[in-house]
Image (cartoon, rainbow, N blue to C red):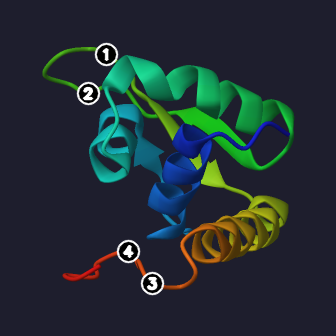
């Protein structure tokens, strides 16, 4: 599994509420990524079994269906591990001085 920064951001967004269905635009906004950029990531995660997807019911106003995504149990385990490792690498790189959300360097 290729764990790019974008992949980690998508995993973090899915882990915010791992039991709910998430639509693409919602994931993109939570991950801070452009909407079109998340779909290749979601496809890789689904192929790896970390994410599953399905289709919503038709919206009676638009007659459109939307695709939703949900992180799997295995995906949750792998995602937590990947995010911990990424945080550890980041802390090692900066000597623990810079932290996400830190106001000072």
* Disc 1 and disc 2 in contact, CB within 8 angstroms: yes
Residue indicated by mark 1: 64
Q: Quadrant of residue 53?
A: top right
Q: Is residue 87 above or below residue 58?
A: below
Q: Count neighbours of disc 4 (C-alpha within 10 A) and say few if under 14, some if 14 to 19, many if 20 or more.
A: few
Q: CA distance from mark 3 to mark 4?
A: 10 Å
- Looking at the picture, tell me which residue is in the foreground, 60 or 7: 7
Expressed as whole percent of the image width and height from the top left, the position of residue 21 reads 48, 53
Q: Count neighbours of disc 1 (C-alpha within 10 A) and say few if under 14, some if 14 to 19, many if 20 or more.
A: few
Q: Please name which of the two marks, 3 or 1, marks the residue nearer to the observer.
A: 3
User: Which quadrant, please, contains the N terminus?
Assistant: top right
Which residue is depicted at the point 31% across and 34% down? 25
* Disc 3 and disc 1 in contact, CB within 8 angstroms: no
Which residue is depicted at the point 41% across and 32% down? 57
At mark 1, the secondary structure is loop
Q: Please name which of the two marks, 4 or 1, marks the residue nearer to the observer.
A: 4
Q: Is 7 positioned to the left or the right of 38 in the image?
A: right
First-in-chain label (3 vs 2): 2
At mark 2, the secondary structure is loop
Expressed as whole percent of the image width and height from the top left, the position of residue 10 reads 51, 47
Q: Is residue 91 above or below residue 86?
A: below
Q: CA distance from mark 4 to mark 2?
A: 39 Å
At mark 3, the secondary structure is loop
First-in-chain label (4 vs 1): 1
Expressed as whole percent of the image width and height from the top left, the position of residue 11 reads 58, 55
Residue indicated by mark 4: 100
Q: CA distance from mark 3 to mark 2?
A: 49 Å
Residue indicated by mark 2: 59
Q: CA distance from mark 1 to mark 2?
A: 6 Å
Q: Please name which of the two marks, 3 or 4, marks the residue nearer to the observer.
A: 3
């Amino acid at each position: 599994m290729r764990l790019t920064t974008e992949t980690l951001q998508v995993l973090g967004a899915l882990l915010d509420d791992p039991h709910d269905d998430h639509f693409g635009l919602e994931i993109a906004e939570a991950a801070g990524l452009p909407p079109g950029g998340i779909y290749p990531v979601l496809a890789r995660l689904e192929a790896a079994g970390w994410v599953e997807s399905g289709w919503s019911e038709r919206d009676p106003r638009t007659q459109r269906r939307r695709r939703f995504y949900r992180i799997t149990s295995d995906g949750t385990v792998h995602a937590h591990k990947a995010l911990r490792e990424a945080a550890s690498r980041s802390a090692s790189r900066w000597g623990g001085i810079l932290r996400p959300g830190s106001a000072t360097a």
